[in-house]
Amino acid sequence: MSIGNPVHRIDGKLKVTGSANYAADFSVGTPLYAELVTSTVGLGRVTSIDDSAARAVPGVRAVYSHANPLPVDAADFFGAGGRAQQSWRPFESADVRFNGEIVGLVVADTLIGAREAARSMRVQYEEQDPAAVFGASGLEPEDLPDRGLSMGDIEQAMEASSQRVEETYTTYANTHNAMELFSTTAQWAGDELTVYVPSQWVEGFAAGIAEELGIDAARVRVVSPYVGGGFGGKGSLFTWTAMVAAAARDQGRPVKLYVTREQGFTTASYRAETEQDFRLGATADGRFTGFEHQGREISSRADTYVVNGGENTARMYHADAVRTGVTCIHADRQTPGFMRAPPEAPYFFALESGVDELAWKLSMDPVELRRINDIDAEPVNGVPFTSRSLMECYDAAAERFGWSDYEQTVGARTEGDWLVGWGCATATYPTQMGPCAVRIHFDATGQARVWVASHDVGTGAYTVIAQATALALGIPVDSVKVELGDSRLPPGTIAGGSISTASNVSAIEMAVAQIHDRMGTTAETMDPTAAFEAFGQRAIEEYAEWIPPAASRQQAKTLYNGKVAIVGGAEEDYTAFAFGAQFAEVRVHKYTREIRVPRLIGAFAAGRIMNEQTARSQYLGGMIWGIGHALLEKTEVDPRNGKIVNANIAEYLVPTNADVQELEAILVPETDTKVNPAGVKGIGEIGIVGTAAAIANAVYHATGTRVRHTPIHVEDLLPQA
Amino acid sequence: MAKTPGGTNREGPRVSRRGLLQGSVASGAAALGNFAGGAAQAQADAQATGSTTPTVSFSINGKTQTATLDARTTLLDYLREDLDLTGTKVGCNHAQCGACTVLIDGARVNSCLTLMATLEGSEVTTIEGISDEGELHPMQQAFIDNDGFQCGYCTPGQIMSAIGCVREGHAGSAPEIREYMSGNLCRCGAYKGIVAAVEQARDQVEEAG
Ligand code: FES
Ligand code: FES
């Protein structure tokens, strides 16, 4: 049985030899090189551009700006059902809406020439004071009343509690910082355009580029077979991509753009900062009474984008009354977007810190408090979970961690100069799916080929798709070849929301069933030579369109339109989530307050696991992201001018190898026959979700200091003057 | 301060991110400072020889070649854009991430911080140059065996760095490997597999020298 086996990645050899082609690795002959110029003020307008020095650089071909714009239209904003990362386009006016916005694009014969020219541009601004961060004056709050949930009488439920937590938790902005630099290479052949761009959504990018250039989507091909990390940062169409294509058309030559690391902080999306007002009450014996979670989230002036995690935190535990809500805070910033576990990472930091605070007030073991409030149906509408193995995860992880030695006393343990603390938290992620089509070719030599415009952003999609096909057909995994990441392939899903595996495997099983049906074969008895002889053909090809059962008619129609449709999570007739439990040990130095995480153990149950090895790597990677979220990652915006002051990968701290010590993911078996035909739940995002709260809870256990924001830094643990 | 990569003294200590940092904590300021230093040194060198387009002879993956280039050309850009050796990756261009790590005369170096003008007589080895007629290098195989990557983007740099790390004698234990491999960031968080891979391949790499 090949499914579930820890099969090594089938693209492993390409990756370790450097022969996997990422977007900027494709050869297009001798391209021209483009370089972006970005604004150095946080709000205002460009008053003049002196490009004489830039144009004097040898080999410079063109300088584009609002004064010499490229013919590119704005496309619809992703958050409003479109494809673009923001609703406006650079160069549409002289306005500067945030610090680091694109104000120029230089094209030159060489990479060095383009860089030199971009740095030689003299841009003058009329500068205004931006309102860029929480607390600034001039922010515009937008209430979104229809995004909240309400059940029961919250005030009455809070009254009925004997202990309660009422606190505000905040999370700072984060930037994806995939290792691969953003880039775009555009090449025209007549009026056919090929674009090499790192993408988690080739279909949507192709459609969006066509929309922006005003050409037929059939003429645009987006190629992105290997993606150097996505994490949500390559899920909506970048503003510069169509600009590069337009420049290539203008110049009659292929054009290649590398976006610098610094520019990647401001010209792509990010996880916005949040402020969350949280209330949770409980009876003396630990039963939750009232639950309220209100979020405020930063967005740009023009676009309404919120992640609204209260929709999911409200579904975690028993409650007699629930109220959630969200407010979008419009600021002079770029438009945020999704980043690994977009709603859950910030909002579960609050929920799981709050539950821990309540456990201390009740003098209860925090694991037991969660057990008391474990549920079979979500509390808002009473809709049952398709499966929920939360407490199985707690039991597995607690045992491995040695939680039975937990003593609920601050500073109970020290080792030398280190204060040792333990904490735990729940992780979850909704199980989601989207419409997906695949084509499978199978021939008499026993070889199969699978085509789908899906993506492998490091998730192991190539391998899992080969495994699923092999298993369904009844052939070895190494007899399957897989092609992904090309908008010319049958439309797959966006690689976001942890939807890929469930959608791909469901579509593959459908296509293979069609093959068996026509050939009269089964996986168990598959003998390709004999089967094709009896069938009288040398090969067979089948195409399947899989539409998730819960999809609306309109969602089903997105398949060939380059639109996103995601169903799942809290639906009308079922509630589908994966669950996990995470335990952290931290050490805080008595004198320096340095914080280390010597141990992190998570147990996760996510339905059928397609490949134990790639699944484990996803969980571990997510947990490492959690270390970053808890202790390191902070996109620091200067309130005076909206400038990101640490826009590089040395000062925006991500976990390094030495930050990770004992790290373990336990795969808790779970069978879910209701969630989708494949029985698969997504695993790409859940690993980050509980980590930050588990670490914060452990920091409290060690020090008695409750830090209600991420990241937690040394200075948060110093004695307050 | 060690001699900058712009220096021409082949005997002098070569600056790599790890050499600079000798530890786990990345110092952007130090790295950037050195980057600037390297560029300044190259400019000084160019002025000394009176050329902004020096001619340099070096070998890449065993192939000797001579090139006349813009003095500002980095090894990374030369490999990727001029030679189409795109196995070496670009993650920052500021010696902050390690994605561009190659071996120069056997030692691991960030190619984004290395000016071509400094490579006279040097032997450069990239990820494309370590497997033997289709047979994977033990370190490459170890990365596959231990799932030492996810997206694979940092992987060529990790592998080159791992070979250098073993040769330096800094792969004695898991904590030592973690410390001395911390100049190579992996945003996917494949660190556990990376450490296991270095441990697996260590003896073979040591034997091969
Ligand atoms: S690209 Fe050279 S260290 Fe990042
Ligand atoms: S494998 Fe993706 S960055 Fe390391």
Image (cartoon, coloured by chain):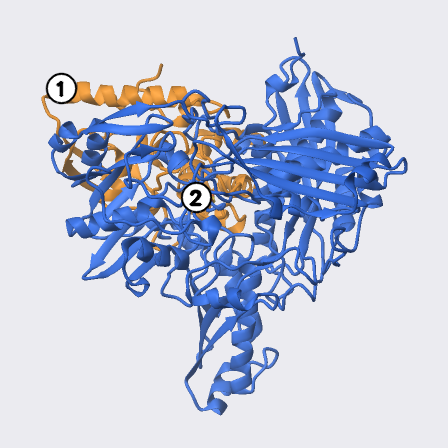
Chain colours: A blue, B orange
Query: Looking at the picture, do discs 1 and 2 lie on one chain?
Result: yes
Which x, y percent locates residue B99?
A: 39, 38
Which x, y percent locates residue A702?
A: 73, 23
Mark linked to residue B155: 2
Rendered position, B54 above or below A292: above
Which x, y percent locates residue A266?
A: 39, 34
Who is closer to the viewer here, A394 or A598?
A: A394
Residue found at x 23% / y 19%: B41
Residue found at x 85% / y 44%: A372
Q: In the picture provided, is A157 more to the left or to the right than A667?
A: right
Rendered position, A508 above or below A443: above
Q: Which residue is mark 1?
A: B47
Callout 1: SS:
helix
The quadrant of the image that shows the C terminus of chain A is top right
Callout 2: SS:
helix
Q: Is residue A62 visible?
A: yes
Q: Chain of mark 1?
A: B
Query: Please, what is the three-letter code of the amino acid marked with disc 1?
Result: Gln
Q: Point out the residue furthest to the left here.
A: B50
Q: In the picture provided, is B172 more to the left or to the right than B82?
A: right
The quadrant of the image that shows the N terminus of chain A is bottom right
**In the image, is the residue at mark 2 within 8 Å of ligand 2 by its beta carbon?**
yes
Who is closer to the viewer here, A444 or A358?
A: A358
Q: In the picture provided, is B10 more to the left or to the right than A128?
A: left
Q: Chain of mark 2?
A: B
Mark linked to residue A281: none
| 10 Å crowding of disc 2: few (<14), some (14-19), many (20+) | many
Q: Is residue B62 visible?
A: no
Tell me how far mark 1 sits from mark 2, CA to CA.
Answer: 38 Å
